[in-house]
Every structure is written in structure tokens, then in C-alpha cells.
Image (cartoon, rainbow, N blue to C red):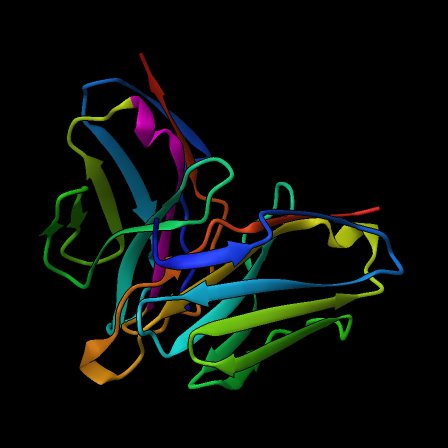
Amino acid sequence: ETGVTQTPRHLVMGMTNKKSLKCEQHLGHNAMYWYKQSAKKPLELMFVYNFKEQTENNSVPSRFSPECPNSSHLFLHLHTLQPEDSALYLCASSQESGDMNTEAFFGQGTRLTVV
Amino acid sequence: DAKTTQPTSMDCAEGRAANLPCNHSTISGNEYVYWYRQIHSQGPQYIIHGLKNNETNEMASLIITEDRKSSTLILPHATLRDTAVYYCIVAYFGNEKLTFGTGTRLTIIP
């Protein structure tokens, strides 16, 4: 248990569906991240939130829409996905504040299959 | 962030020390070396990080060469649960926007 919880653990959705992935951290961190891990490819950073503000969007298609209502919760809203979007989606959190920076803590991930 | 080069895969006998090398010849003076691992179907787990001095914690030791162009992660007594993909990453301190490569797939052999 890393203190970062992702739900659901597995999700199968059709290309016309709308679904959301949820991430929650109980570590008091101020930064949260979404990563994507496709089969046989390295983890790719998708989005970064710091103090609830999005600070990075790595050219992610608009069919992925992040939301960070507070520093403990992060969502990834999905709509009209493609089969190639099937992947493991990982959430992470860290503390970023000068000398108090911590390493990244990852959740267990959501295994997404788009059919 | 600088790039790293790691062997694709390695085997190690259970109970022996596992030594995982990493080359980072373009590392800049302010960049740290981080190691994470990912056990199958789980999220990555932080192991250790260092700047230029050798570091040790309850999980592993990190040996960084004097010129900082390479490093070695040492798992002193490998167990079957250490079977995972190990990632060597260089990044500025506090920059957790990590750039993962393909890592080294370490298999611990009974």
C-alpha cells in the first residue's frame, strides 16, 4: 500500500462510452500525475497538477480530460477512446516544495481495455 | 533530462547480490540518479536516489562513479520478490516528472 489508491483496477469500455478513472492520495502531497503505460512501451507522462493547477500537458489528445478538484483527488475523464488507448494508467503523487521534495509514490494503476 | 542506458535483462541467483548497471554519460551537475522498480502489474516503486556520494537504505545501495557518468544499483541479497523491471532515471532534485526508459528486467532464479 503506497498511500495512492486508484479505482477501478480494471475497466473495459466501448469506443462510444464515457468513463472516469479516479485517484486518491492520503499522503498530504501537493503534486499529482497521470502516466500511461502501453504494452512494451515505457511509461509516458500525460498530465501534471501542482496545487490543483495543471502545469503540464504532454500533447495528450482531448479525448483524455483530467480534473483535479483538490490536492488529494485526481480524475481522468475518458470519452470516445480508440482501441490503441488500451493501456495501464498510473497515478502518482509527490511533495514539491523546496527542500521538502519527496520521491513519487505510484498507485496500482487502472488496466483499461477499449473495445 | 539526460538519457540513461541499461541492459535489457539480467538474471541473478536467489540470495546473491544483484548488481544493475546504468550509464548516464550526459548527466548534468545538478541532476540526481533515481532508481525505481516495477513489479509485474503494479505501479513503479521508488528505491533510492543520489547525487554523487554512494547511498544506502533498507532496500539497496547506489554506487555512483566519481565522474558521475555511470552508476550501479546493488540489491545485497536478492529474493524472488525482487523480480521486476528496474528503471534508472536522471532528473533534477524534486522534479518528479520522470522520464522512464525501458529499464532492466531482472529475474531472480531460485
Residue displayed at 42% across by 69% down: B1
Q: Quadrant of residue A60?
A: bottom right
Question: Residue A84, how many percent across, how many down?
Answer: 78, 51
**Front-most of A28 and B100?**
A28
**Front-most of A47 and B67?**
A47
Residue displayed at 25% across by 74% down: A101
Asked if B80 appears above or below A49 in the picture, the reply is above
| Bounds of the magenta segment | B80-91
The answer, for residue B27, to whether it is visible in the render is yes
- Examine the residues drawn in magenta and state their main secondary structure: strand
Quadrant into which the C terminus of chain B falls: top left
Q: Is A72 on the left-hand or right-hand side of A34?
A: left
Question: Residue A30, how many percent across, how many down?
Answer: 37, 79
Q: Is A20 on the left-hand or right-hand side of A17?
A: left
Q: Does the magenta stretch include residue B82?
A: yes
Asked if A67 appears above or below A113 in the picture, the reply is below
Asked if B36 appears above or below A91 in the picture, the reply is above
Residue displayed at 29% across by 37% down: B20
Q: Is A79 on the left-hand or right-hand side of B57?
A: right
**Front-most of B32 and B108?**
B108
Q: In which quarter of the image is residue B84?
A: top left
Question: Residue A53, how many percent across, how many down?
Answer: 50, 88
The answer, for residue B98, to whether it is visible in the render is no
Q: Quadrant of residue B26?
A: bottom left
Question: Residue A51, how many percent across, how many down?
Answer: 42, 86
Total marks drawn? Answer: 0
Identify the residue at the far top of this view: B110
**Front-most of A67 and B31?**
A67
Q: Is A47 on the left-hand or right-hand side of B109?
A: right
Residue displayed at 31% across by 22% down: B80
Q: Does the magenta stretch include residue A57?
A: no
